[in-house]
Amino acid sequence: MAADNSLIESTKADEDVALSTDSDSSFWRGGRPVYAEKDTYGKPLPRYRTEIRSRWSKNNLYFLFICPYEKLNLKPEPSASTETFQLWDWDVAEVFIGSDFQNIRHYKEFELSPQGEWVDLDIDLDKPHHEEGWKWNSGFQVAARIDRAANIWYGAMRIPLAAIDSRPPKEGNTFRINLFRCQGQAPDRKLIVWQPTMSDTFHVPEHFGLLKLVEPRSERRR
């Protein structure tokens, strides 16, 4: 059976762990990767092929981004202790995720930078200024690390499931999702996506893929 390229499976973890950017850790090795490697119109961007892994626990949803870069576009005087409005103007990794399949124009947005800055937003595209949703706070946490020798930065997120879903967490729960990166400065700025939106913007929920909560493969074979 061919792999579903519009589905990311998030593998259950037995317990929550300290947030880490170590892609070789046993926790992150348990996540099955997908790749953001195209621009918003579907043109391949192999130089920026971004690996994304996901795990979940009874309380949280985790993501790890592995982000190759040429030259970082970083905000001066970063703050990792307070939310950074308009973080999307700089290099970031982003998760757009929603659990409302009836109103797909309402979803949550989570961003982190290579410097550990962050912002979360409650997006409602039916509102004239949906960016005002940044005043919402999910309680999510981030970690970031730059490997300058390898020209790769790593970003991890831990999102409380209660902030994005009213259902009790369980295997089989499905979300609408898309995964993105912004990289570099204009005029060479790259918008790197998992599911192409066929637009100049990321905010096209009709082109989101799916995330499914699953048990580890060994558990499912029993």
Image: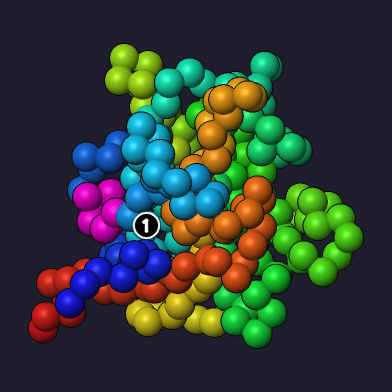
Q: Position of residue 32 (x, y in %)?
A: 26, 58
Q: Residue at x 81, y 57 (%)?
A: 130
Q: Taking 126 as reference, is 27 above or below it?
A: above
Q: Position of residue 6 (x, y in %)?
A: 40, 67
**Residue 51 left/right relative to 185:** left
Q: Taking 202 as reference, is 163 above or below it?
A: below
Determine if residue 158 is in view. no
Asked whether 174 or 222 is in front, the reply is 174
Q: Residues within 10 Å of mark 1 (few under 14, many from 20)?
A: many
Q: Quadrant of residue 147?
A: top left
Determine if residue 62 is in view. yes
Q: What segment carries the magenta color? A: 27-33
Q: Taking 198 as reference, is 151 above or below it?
A: above
Q: Residue at x 70, y 54 (%)?
A: 121
Label 1 secondary element: strand
Q: Position of residue 110 (x, y in %)?
A: 60, 51
Asked whether 5 or 9 is in front, the reply is 5
Name the amino acid, label 1: Ser
Q: Quadrant of residue 154?
A: top left
Q: Taking 38 as reference, is 136 above or below it?
A: below
| Quarter in which the C terminus is drawn | bottom left
Q: Which residue is mark 1?
A: 54
Q: Position of residue 8 (x, y in %)?
A: 37, 64
Q: Quadrant of residue 199?
A: bottom right
